[in-house]
Amino acid sequence: MIAELLFATFFGLLLLGIHRKVIARIQRRPGPPVWQEILHMLKFSFKTTWVPATASTTLFVGVVLVAIGIWTAALFVVLSGGSLLVIFAIYMLHKIVEHGFGLSSGSPYGKFGGVRSVISAASEIPLMVSVAAIAIFTKSLMISDIVAYQQSYGPLLFTVPLAAVAMYVVLLSKMPFGPFSIVESKELVSGYKTEHFGVWRAGLEICNGLKTYVLLLTFILVFAGGLPLWTILLLMLLITMSLSFVCALSPMLSPYDSVTIQTLIAGLMVLYVAILGVVS
Amino acid sequence: MKKQYALALTLIAAVSGIGAMALSLWNLLPSWAYAGVLVIGFPLFVLGLGLYWMAREGEADIPFLGY
């Protein structure tokens, strides 16, 4: 498990580095090296670290521990074929963690980032109604059962493609520099993480690496089924690059537009699931 | 936080994780308990190691208020 944990952290960070590189190349910039996010994590580990005078020390530090802990738990849930509902619960916890990051520092930028995190949660989490479409066919939300179902009936990507689209929007919402990345937009400096520097930011980078790996792995297992490891890693790379294209070619939306679009997609998904429920 | 406390935290987290791995390999610890040790120990190890390297023991800073 320790090996899987370290691999997931570093591969997730590598994917985020590739994400930045692809965006830069599309925009005709040289961009950073693909291992930049790994270097970021190491760099922040060596930087001077302290707690701002206006911060709530317990929350300021504790929220970093919780951020890493919940995505470590999420990795083990996915690897053990646990319930999708647990993954989504952890996703919701992450939104609370982002809120905690923003509120703990006492900085106005962090607070606005935290508030935007809650706003975006209101529209991102309903997107997970797509799991209902999966449950109609698999009769289970255990990842191991979903993988077993696909071995018999083929990938769910072809059975419930719109559910895959909704989950893809969830992935897109969590990628940096994307149209829905309102929690980190530039008018807020770095949003909820503005005040978390040094070791705290290194911890957050590790959390981001794990989160990217876990969400992509979940998407692949749920919609493509159990595949050899090298195929899963290749698919992760391809999905990341496709997300990079979307991020590079679309502007960051205003908070209002971001929530509106995600809510509309969630509404369409509810309709889709209702139709599937009636038809099947 | 004093550096020796950070070092102690790092070592406790590392020893707990490696110990849990060893016990799990010998079937003396169920895998869910091993995972639980890592869920708690990994964040403590990461922060403890970083704090041991670079944490200051001086005064706190004011928050960032703009460029």
Image (tube, coloured by chain):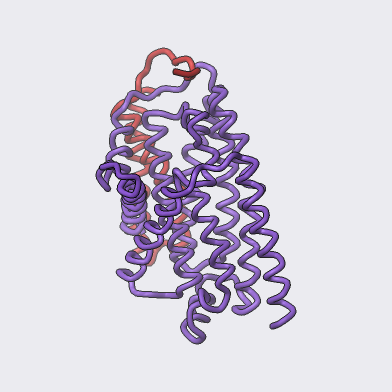
Chain colours: A purple, B red
Q: As displayed, is residue A87 above or below residue B45?
A: below
Q: Is residue B15 visible?
A: no
Q: Which residue occupies 69% across, 83% down?
A: A280
Quarter-wise, where is residue A116 in the image?
A: top right
Say which quadrant the N terminus of chain A sits in.
Answer: bottom left
Quarter-wise, where is residue B56 in the image?
A: top left
x and y, in percent, of residue A156 in the image = 52, 76
Q: As displayed, is residue A54 above or below residue A87?
A: above
Is A229 on the left or on the right of A96, as rendered?
left
Q: As displayed, is residue A268 above or below residue A181?
A: below
* Residue that lies at the very extreme toward the bottom in this rendered image: A152
Viewer-proximal residue among A254 and B54? A254
Viewer-proximal residue among B51 and B3? B51
x and y, in percent, of residue A217 in the image = 43, 63
Q: Is residue A161 visible?
A: yes
Q: Which residue occupies 58% across, 62% down?
A: A166
x and y, in percent, of residue A71 in the image = 47, 51
